[in-house]
Amino acid sequence: MTEVARPFDIVLTGGRIIDPRNGIDRVLDIAIRGGRIAAIGKALDTSSAGEIRNVSGLLVVPGLIDLHTHIYHKATAYGVDPDPIAKRSSVATLVDAGSAGAGNFAGLRDFVFAHSSFRLLAYLNISYPGIFAFDRDYVVGEAAIDELLSVEHCVEIAARNRDVIVGVKVRLGIGTSGSIGMLALERAIEAAERLDLPVMTHIGKPPPTYAEILARLRPGDVLTHCFRPAPNSAVDEDGIVLPALLDARERGVLFDIGHGMGAFGFASAESAIAMNFKPDIISSDVHALCVEGPAFDLLHTMSKVINCGVSVSEAVAMTTEAPARAMRRDDLGHLSVGASADISLIEPHAAAFPFVDVAGIERTGNLLLKPHGLFVSGVPVEMGPRDWESRHYLV
């Protein structure tokens, strides 16, 4: 007996589909059926489709992935509610970057992840309590206390939660790991090796230095805050990319933006990108201290990086395929037929728009990416009346 193909549930027509995994960057139609990508092609048959949406003029891309966020909402001083952030930035997957450690991960999973409409994943902090004391005028470095860096507890909790934990996080710098920074990194790497997971390491003000951190990272590990301003910038006083970065990239270390409130400088980014040292991944590091600027969210951060010299298609790859591969999640970050229908709809808005980095330096860009729509597993997300709109989109 021949099975009769069911009609498409939804067909999006006329949009510019950018799917780096499959080498697609052109105007095509895309169809959803049963929560998955059913077809991509020119002039798909829409005669029996449940719904047809004309998305001409929009970018139609795999559901965006923000690899570095802080969404332990209300349990940490800087955690933000993931759902409004996802809606206003057309992000399907948010990854918490170490807000929780072994001692409090259950709360992140049960009280945040379980109540979200979006796909939430996490890096587990090597420090037992996670980032427990971080505010604008009050910081206690969780990686500066030897007794909190428990490999055994980290491995135990990560092993129990492998469905949502994608790596081990450590924050390095004088304010976060104090005088024992490299010890904290060694503990994180030990836990990650036992789990067969990557490490994501934050880089702050030295010690340790950029070169010292990179020398210890392994292929597939992620260095976040890669274009932070000096000290510990990616470039020297003459704007030349440090040799340590070139060596690390050759070994397979990945470089992530991680904008946040203190980790993206135009001087670093523009110089590095001009030398063709582009980030592998763009993430926002959105949290309570930067959600209303200077980072705002992933689309705003993407817009900044594009205006520093990265192409739109490259920026899409850096927020879809690249973070999915960094997490070893082959099911995410692409629009292959049969894949979960995570689709972000983005409006490329041409405007002379002022962007500001973490040092207050301003650049006028000519392109701002604005959210238009989102599907998560084929389900359209109700953007709501202007609930995504923040003052940085009012142009």
Image (cartoon, helix red, strand yellow):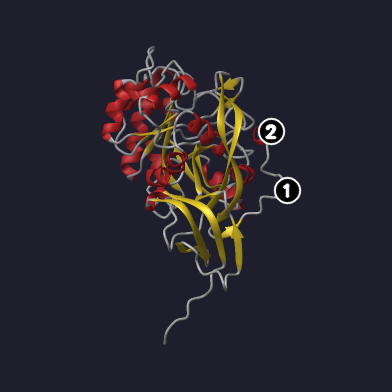
Q: Identify which amino acid the numbered label 1 is placed on.
A: Pro
Q: Could you say whether the residue bearing mark 1 is in a helix, strand or loop?
A: loop
Q: Is residue 284 visible?
A: no
- Horizontally, residue 102 falls left or right of residue 197, namely right
Q: Are marks 1 and 2 in contact (CB under 8 Å)?
A: no
**Front residue (pair 133, 266):** 266
Image: 253 above or below 203: below
> How many residues crowd mark 2 within 10 Å: few (<14), some (14–19), many (20+)?
few
**Front residue (pair 27, 170):** 27
Residue 101 is situated, as x and y percent measured from the top left of the image, at 48, 38
Image: 286 above or below 344: above
Q: Is residue 365 visible?
A: yes
> According to the image, label 2 marks what residue?
391
Outermost residue toward the right? 385
Image: 72 above or below 242: below
- Horizontally, residue 208 falls left or right of residue 380, namely left
